[in-house]
Image (cartoon, helix red, strand yellow):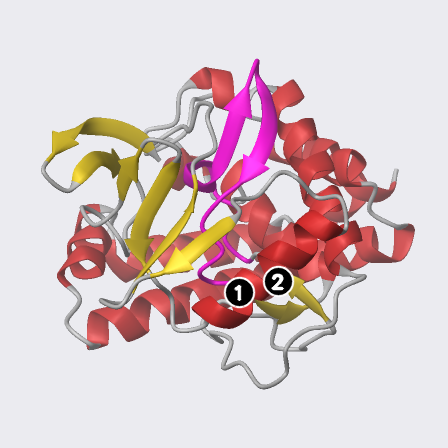
Amino acid sequence: MTTEGKTAAGEALVGGMANAGAVFRHGAVVERPAPRTARALHDHLHALAEHGFDAAPRPVRLTADGREQVTYIPGDVALPPYPRWVMTETALRSVGSLLRRLHDASAAITVDTCAEWPRALADPAGGTMLCHNDVCPDNVVFRDGHAAALIDFDMAAPGRAVWDVAMTARYWVPMLDPTSAAALHPTGLDAPTRLRILADGYGLSPQERAELPYVIEQATASCRAFVADRVADGDPTYTQALSEQGGWQRWDRIQGWLLAHREIFTAALLN
């Protein structure tokens, strides 16, 4: 998130959809609405630090009024429409590398199976590692053109590494048809090439590379269902965004484009 201005509640940070207008910075601390899984998530963030992953906020405390405090991570966060600096190949490769570092640390941490992790964007196949599930540009802190940290773990849930890579690819390649991509991303981005760069930056295995295009299709379907649920609940933020971005026809176009290009993406990943 980026700074918007100072209020009585602190320095307002902008970005994101679910917590828009509700996140404030107080010096070295960020205060925001606590997710339902806050206690388990804070334990996980502490464990990440203990396993050497220093690229995530450190929990400070939970407040009595349902908010959480975490450490502020300095750097640059891109907001839509995304500037060209955050979509360079160097930036993309560094996102893959950062996600791999997260997964290497997370794989060594036992997931709290008693926590009710959010399922909306979670891997339907499940898994034994806690995935971030929302590594969009709004949730990556950059320094000197390289991804330096991940923020906003609200959608974290158990899953497979390839699922988290697929979710990340949706935003960073992006895995969108050209018309949809042009709404928020710079023009001229080559999707097959960028998908390969992300996979190389992460160090994706040959088997996972072969699976990735189909898993991206699955992840896209989950994201569509996520939006549909919020629109059905009358969420004004998602209802407005759906209308402004072309409605369900846009989702139809994206899903059709992914299916039509599956072999091209597979070849780019494996050859």
Which residues lie in the magenta part?
133-156
Residue drawn at the location 49% of the way across and 82% of the way down: 116
Residue for badge 2: 44
The amino acid pointed to by label 1 is Leu
Q: Secondary structure at mark 2?
A: helix
Residue drawn at the location 34% of the way across and 53% of the way down: 250
Q: Secondary structure at mark 1?
A: helix
The alpha-carbon separation of the residues under discs 1 and 2 comes to 5 Å
User: For this rendering, which residue is in front, 253 or 96?
Assistant: 96
Please report contact status of discs 1 and 2: CB closer than 8 Å, yes or no.
yes
In the image, residue 124 above or below residue 7: below
Residue for badge 1: 41
In the image, taking residue 195 as reference, residue 39 lies left or right, namely: left
In the image, residue 66 above or below residue 80: below
Residue 6, position as x, y percentages in the image: 15, 29
Residue at the left extreme?
8
In the image, taking residue 183 as reference, residue 132 lies left or right, namely: right
- The tag on residue 225 is none
User: Is any atom of residue 262 visible in this view?
Assistant: no
Residue 90, position as x, y percentages in the image: 66, 19
Residue 248, position as x, y percentages in the image: 29, 61
The amino acid pointed to by label 2 is His
Residue 213, position as x, y percentages in the image: 68, 54
